[in-house]
Amino acid sequence: MEIIIQPTPAAATTIAARLVARLIREKPAAVLGLATGGTMEPLYRELVALKLDWSRLTTFNLDEYVGISPQHPQSYHHFMWEKLFGQVNISDQNVNLPDGLAQDVPATCEHYERKIFSAGGLDLQLLGIGTHGHIGFNEPTSSLASRTRIKTLTPQTRQDNARFFGSVEAVPHHVITMGIGTILESRHCLLLAFGKKKARAIAEAVEGPITAMNPASALQLHPKVTVFLDEEAAGELKLTDYYRWVYAQKPDWQKI
Ligand code: PGA
């Protein structure tokens, strides 16, 4: 894993945006795995401002709530169209999110997996992290080999996301999420985490043992992961001096 620690979330987000933009310029028909949540909003703002060509890109989002319509203001469909897709020249038939209203959930999940495979697999996957280490909505104890499927949210995640819904009662109980196995097959994972609340989950994921109790720790098995942190989210890591030194010593060809 490459750990990039920056003084502020904004500085880290700018570097992450540069990496995404570079892929889009170098591979105009790339397949992007996208994420939602507060951490992604500034990243999408930066990508929109860069005025990139999205016309040939294909996107797959990590997850969606079950039981709310795409028009619901808190659906991830709505989030993505508001924050990103509605502001770039993406073609709507190239946009994919799990169908939270699917009648046949296992079939829709299988179809999602097949579609990712047929598109050539994910070139890049954006990831946030939950306060207990989830990636996508793979909650603690998720199988590290899991594929797209239905999950039940933990009380902690419903509490964390209550700020978007107005109350914890309004947060759906179920979601459809890409699995950890799905995420591990993407060619490059970019994990962004900011603030003190994420510090424990990040320390466990980066420096702890690989365990389903912190699903993000499975990223240690992935050959290409870049983690973008601010000082607060890096606050419980042990090897911060080493990570800073590595970043400062990057050879020119590796610079972002
Ligand atoms: P956040 O969510 O960006 O809103 O903190 C991240 C996550 O739960 O994966």
Image: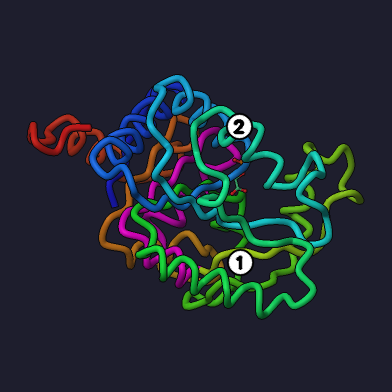
Quadrant showing the C terminus: top left
Q: Residue at x 75, y 45 (%)?
A: 161
Residue 210 makes an appearance in the image: yes
Is residue 256 highlighted in magenta?
no
Q: Residue at x 61, y 64 (%)?
A: 177
Image x and y of residue 99, in percent: 70, 62
Q: Which residues are magenta?
A: 180-208
> Which of pointers 1 and 2 indicates the residue nearer the eye?
2
156 shown above or below 107: above
Q: Earlier in the sequence, mark 1 or mark 2?
A: 2
Which structural element holds mark 1?
A: loop
Which of the two residues, 238 or 152, is positioned nearer the viewer here? Answer: 152
State the CA–CA distance, disc 1 to disc 2: 33 Å
> Which label sits on residue 140?
1
Is residue 196 highlighted in magenta?
yes
Q: Is residue 127 left or right of residue 17?
A: right
Query: How many dots with numbers?
Result: 2
The residue tagged 2 is 86
Regarding ligand 1, which quadrant of the image does it lie in?
top right
